[in-house]
Image: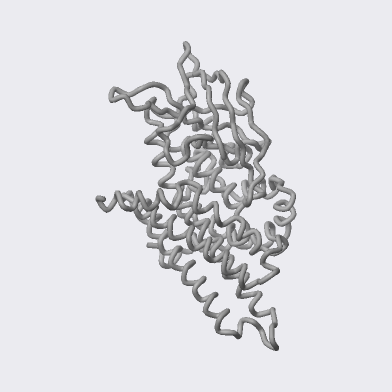
């Protein structure tokens, strides 16, 4: 457990908190309202080394660990989730599969640019007709000589259509296993490859300053060497990727939940009603106290999951618990913060308006709450 942060972790946390407060908070509202990707913020995050936090220095990383990434995500999400999810997806879904499963040549080619945020990678798993049920995957990849030929589509893919997106790692059916199940492999498809089309960006409820697109692949040809890891191991690869990613999403969720507390405490000390500050009313005090309790409990949950992961212990159940508890806390706190703010909470110019719009997807992305409960039950032997 990380009950007390080391000096190194605490220094990182403070640095990211200051960046979020001084660089992100003053400008992100305009990006959000205009549904624009904040390239300059991402560039600065790259210069700070945030995209390289958990990667070795030999590949341009900072030589840190996954918990360091989680701390950064929490502090960013206390201010804005669009920026936080850009970092989370860029690292845990874009670069981490290259780091975990890539060949030396693939690591050398992609990781330095990903760590510097000169390029972003995307993770092409979800399809229009299959999300939680990967067995419904329809995208195919067939070997034709020394090339993969890919056909299919992907949906809701983060960081897939920016001007700095370098590639999408595509999960595709590459054959059948002896038992008749689909053989799934992952293949790196560089941006700009003929036949690879990025559809126009979605009109989203939240995360409006992040990048999300549907992708299509029509006879897309890439070298056979673009296979990521072993053929037929794609399913196992993305399960590991999602297990780790759930801890990161939990950290992001805690950040949003804590941001709701921060804003509510500030507002309750300023807003007057019936002759006194609303923070003097017990009804408001109790509501904010419940919000703080949720954020604190969720933080302990993701710290525990991260500690087990870093020790090399099984952490699937703990990651699912952390993601479930933290995303619930984010949604509940966003609702309560909006209530504390009253009519102003319904205005996008206030952070809690963005928090409310951003919170719901945390109960869906990288495994729905129902999937988390299913995973927890299975780990209990049910």
Q: Residue furthest bottom?
A: 275
Q: Residue furthest top?
A: 145
Evaluate whether residue 104 shows in this view: no
Evaluate whether residue 204 shows in this view: yes
Q: Which image quarter: residue 30?
A: bottom right
Position of residue 220 relative to residue 327, above or below, is above
| Residue 334 as seen in the image, left or right of residue 235 | right
| Residue 278 as seen in the image, left or right of residue 31 | left
At 65% from the left and 71% from the top, the residue drawn is 341
Residue 375 location, x and y as percent?
Answer: 35, 49
At 47% from the left and 68% from the top, the residue drawn is 294
Residue 250 location, x and y as percent?
Answer: 47, 56
Residue 177 location, x and y as percent?
Answer: 32, 24
| Residue 300 as seen in the image, left or right of residue 201 | left
At 58% from the left and 79% from the top, the residue drawn is 284
At 63% from the left and 52% from the top, the residue drawn is 206
Residue 144 location, x and y as percent?
Answer: 48, 12
The residue nearer to you, when weighing 108 against 136, is 136
The residue nearer to you, when weighing 80 against 274, is 274
């Amino acid at each position: 457990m990380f009950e007390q942060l080391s000096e190194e972790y605490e220094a990182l946390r403070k640095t990211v908190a200051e960046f979020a407060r001084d660089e992100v908070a003053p400008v992100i509202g305009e990006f959000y309202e205009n549904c624009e990707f904040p390239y300059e913020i991402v560039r600065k995050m790259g210069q700070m080394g945030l995209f390289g936090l958990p990667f070795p220095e030999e590949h341009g990383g900072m030589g840190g660990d996954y918990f360091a990434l989680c701390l950064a995500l929490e502090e960013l999400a206390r201010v804005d989730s669009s920026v936080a999810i850009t970092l989370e997806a860029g690292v845990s879904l874009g670069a981490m599969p290259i780091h975990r499963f890539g060949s030396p040549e693939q690591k050398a080619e992609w990781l330095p640019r990903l760590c510097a945020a000169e390029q972003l990678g995307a993770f092409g798993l979800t399809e229009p007709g299959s999300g939680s049920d990967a067995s419904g995957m329809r995208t195919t990849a067939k070997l034709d000589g020394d090339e993969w030929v890919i056909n299919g589509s992907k949906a809701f893919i983060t960081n897939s259509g920016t001007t700095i997106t370098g590639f999408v790692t595509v999960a595709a059916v590459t054959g059948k296993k002896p038992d008749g199940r689909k053989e799934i492999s992952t293949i790196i498809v560089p941006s700009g490859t003929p036949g690879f089309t990025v559809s126009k960006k979605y009109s989203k409820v939240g995360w409006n300053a992040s990048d999300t697109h549907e992708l299509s692949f029509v006879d897309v040809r890439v070298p056979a060497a673009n296979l990521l890891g072993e053929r037929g191991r794609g399913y196992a690869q993305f399960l590991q990727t999602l297990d780790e990613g759930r801890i990161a999403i939990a950290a992001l969720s805690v950040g949003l939940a804590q941001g709701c507390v921060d804003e509510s405490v500030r507002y309750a000390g300023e807003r007057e009603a019936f002759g006194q500050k609303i923070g003097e009313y017990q009804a408001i005090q109790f509501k904010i106290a419940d919000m703080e309790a949720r954020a604190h409990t969720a933080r302990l949950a993701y710290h525990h999951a991260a500690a087990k992961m870093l020790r090399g212990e099984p952490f699937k159940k703990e990651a699912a618990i952390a993601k479930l508890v933290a995303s619930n806390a984010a949604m509940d706190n966003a609702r309560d913060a909006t209530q504390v703010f009253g009519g102003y909470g319904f205005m996008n110019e206030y952070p809690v308006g963005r928090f409310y719009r951003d919170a719901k997807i945390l109960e869906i992305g990288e495994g729905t709450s129902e999937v988390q409960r299913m995973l927890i039950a299975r780990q209990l032997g049910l």
